[in-house]
Amino acid sequence: MMRHLLLILLSTFLINIPIAVSQFKADANSPFARNEHPRLFFTQKTLPEVRQRIIRFYKTDFQNFVAHMNRLMPVIPGGKGLSDYNDLAGAARSFAFLAVIDPASVGQSSAVMSSQKYAQKALQIAEYICSELPDDWKEEHHGASNLATRKGGVASLALQVVYDWTFQFSTLQQRQRIADKLILFWDNRYNSRKVKLENHYAANVHIYAGALGFFGDKDLGQHRQAKAAAMMDSFHDVFIRRQLQVSERLFEGSSDWIEGEGYAMDGYIGIMLLAGAAGPALGQNLFHEYSWFRYSPYWVYFSAMPWPYKKDYYFTQHNTGGCMAVNTWQPSAMMSLAAANLVKTDPVLSGLAAWIVARSPYGHPVDSYRYYEPHNFDLFYKFLYGVKHVPKLSPSQVDMDLSVHLGQGYAFRSDHHQTDATLIQFTAPMFWYDNGHNEQDHGAIGIYKFGTLAVNSVHGKSAGKDIPRAGRPDKSMAFNNVLGIGPDKEVRLEIGRIKKVDEPEDFQLGKVSQAGEVEARRFEKNQFDYVNYNYTKSYKGGNKASLARRALVYLRGQTNDEFLLVMDRVKSPNKKYFLLHTPENIIAEEKSWFPVGTGHWITPARKLSVTNRLAGAHGKMIISSLWPKKSEIHKFGGTGREWVFADGTPVEFDASRFGERAQFLLGNHNLQIRSDEGLFLTVMQIGDANTLQQSAEIKPLSGSGWFGALIDRSRVVIFSQTENPLRKVSYSLSHSGQTRHVITELPKNIKYRVRRDRKIIAQGTTGQHGSVFFEDNIKGQTSYFVDVFN
């Protein structure tokens, strides 16, 4: 809980305190400033720790690694096994590592060559890379995350570590050759106007960092040192400011990504590898200093569906991804980087990351990585960033919060059970980041219980034969579980033309990048979670809407006694669409559907249900539409209508490829509640299809300026009907037993009192969240009066 409070305080600080613009300047006591070698990934001081870690935890792995590298020793660069750039880069790094680590110093007494021989082999490969790679080399955008593509492996990073780790064995001419190539890479660097938290820059930032290894080595010559200074300024501008400092602002002191999961792997791993290289040189632990790295285990854990599909645990966001499972190798590589770099400074988050890798259902062992070769993977994911030496801590062991803020949204789990947990996600970004794959999904919800229940629909990338790829446009607001505003079929936002802003100063309240603000949030342990998101600033033009607000209340309880209430309040002359995408058919309870077109039905029912029985799933959701009072309820589905726009027209995709996995992950039916009114209140009961036989009794409540829901005669949730905070609320209910009451949208930080009939039963202040929660035991008809006063 203290960590969560820290996140709130940190995000407030980061959003409101300006960051000074400055050129690169290293700490005077850092290995970088003292011109020490080695300095990348480890230093003279920490190298003995690396040796001891190998001796204690990786002795057998290291023996196998040495034997593998010895077999590569006679292979000429460009020959079989050392022809693809990823193999060249991996072998160069690995031979340089053997040179600096000295296998004899870690108990390798047989079949070991001298450090000098390993160094010269690394330098031989580096010379080949310098000769073969064009001067305008651009790092492959997937090259850092998988280390395995033909043009991957991050050649610029390989040249850097060869320079740094073989420093004592190389000649001045050899070092000048490497430095010159790194300078040429930088002279011809990737220099798009794109924002920098995206996968091309996540790989090519290593070229911006090309002088980390040779800056300060005066024997290289004055010209090279002048270039090195300019390169370090660009490293500071792109890596420190436009990636790390922007991540603090954009994700509000937490961890998140703004694209599909494949791009997330490119972003996290590519930038993490540079942080791992640069931090020791600069005398900093960047993983601890920057929340984006530090809280990345939270992002992985709360982005994973609790229920697997055929033994694979998938990420929840797939619109612009490859429908990647969490229990594949790249998430484990990412978590290994986090675990090893935080083990001394944050043992809790380090332990959680190590648990994800080694003991959770999401982990993937290094030797089973796709395209595994020891020279490509062992250095990073065993000897430098393996997790054998990291104590593993499960979410329950660290008493991990069940309600978290994750950058551009919130996530709520019912518990930490690996398969039975409920997961609710709510997208509520403060800023719009103009990345090419960013989703317009402000206010979107995701619901997961014993499978998928409410998911984002439509897939725009390649994900296998059983998941079709949609034609453009594939990022419509209509494909998310949002409150969309017409008249266009995409129900797009009006964010406006935000230029490629990507400096930390661009992400502050009131700047053009602001797209919304969470104006109230309250996490009441074991009771409820409440988030109130105003995203009116996402309609900057004002043509579509002058108000857009979505508030969410998740009422916690045992299985079948959990409820999600979604309140939408908008002002717009256009049609409004409450959208929900489901993995199975939508049943009209106690009513019927009437066909009005191909794959299109309407119903007068106000209660509907969805049951997911795909591949062993058994989740169920019962949907009650309490407001608007005048609405049209539509359903779309069937072959070719699995994915549709807001107006019901089908998305362009190959329906013959629409398999069960596509249905499970991306839905095949669409619910639309259409209305001209501006108030919506929708209640979802979440449960187990095997045991949820009868739905809860859900009734609307309303009074002067307020409206809400009464659930099973014992749970009350109330919102304001207008933007004016509530000052007085009175209502009656009839029940025998315990009742629980959540009154939201009251004035903040003001005194309140609650009376049952004439007796005061609760009083206090409404707090920063402007809400009141109280419990009571009653018998029969009871009236409540809630009022606030100065």
Image (spheres, rainbow, N blue to C red):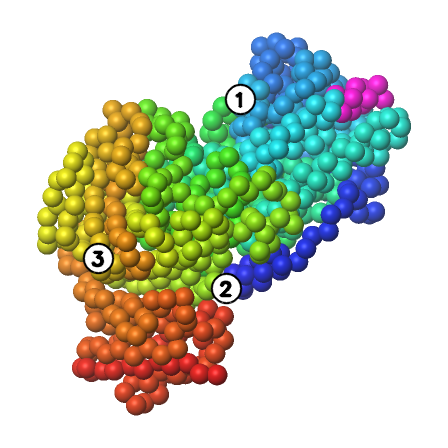
Give the left or right position of residue 184, taking residue 531 as reference. Answer: right
Nearest the viewer among 266 and 388 is 266
Which stretch did the figure color magenta?
A: 172-183
Number of other residues with Cα within 10 Å of mark 1, as a class: few under 14, some 14 to 19, many 20 or more: some
Task: Check if residue 276 falls in the magenta segment.
Answer: no
Residue 386 seen in the figure: no
Residue on which disc 2 sits: 1
Question: Which residue is at 19% across, 82% downward?
Answer: 781
Vertical side of 317 occupied by 224: above or below:
above
For marks 3 and 2 on the same chain, the one whose residue lies earlier in the sequence: 2
Front position among marks 3 and 1: 3
Q: Which residue is mark 1?
A: 149
The residue drawn where x is 33% and y is 49% is 574
Mark 3 vs mark 2, foreground winner is 3
Q: Amino acid at mark 1?
A: Thr
Labels 3 and 1 touching (C-beta < 8 A): no
Dominant SS in magenta = helix
Alpha carbons under labels 2 and 1: distance apart: 42 Å
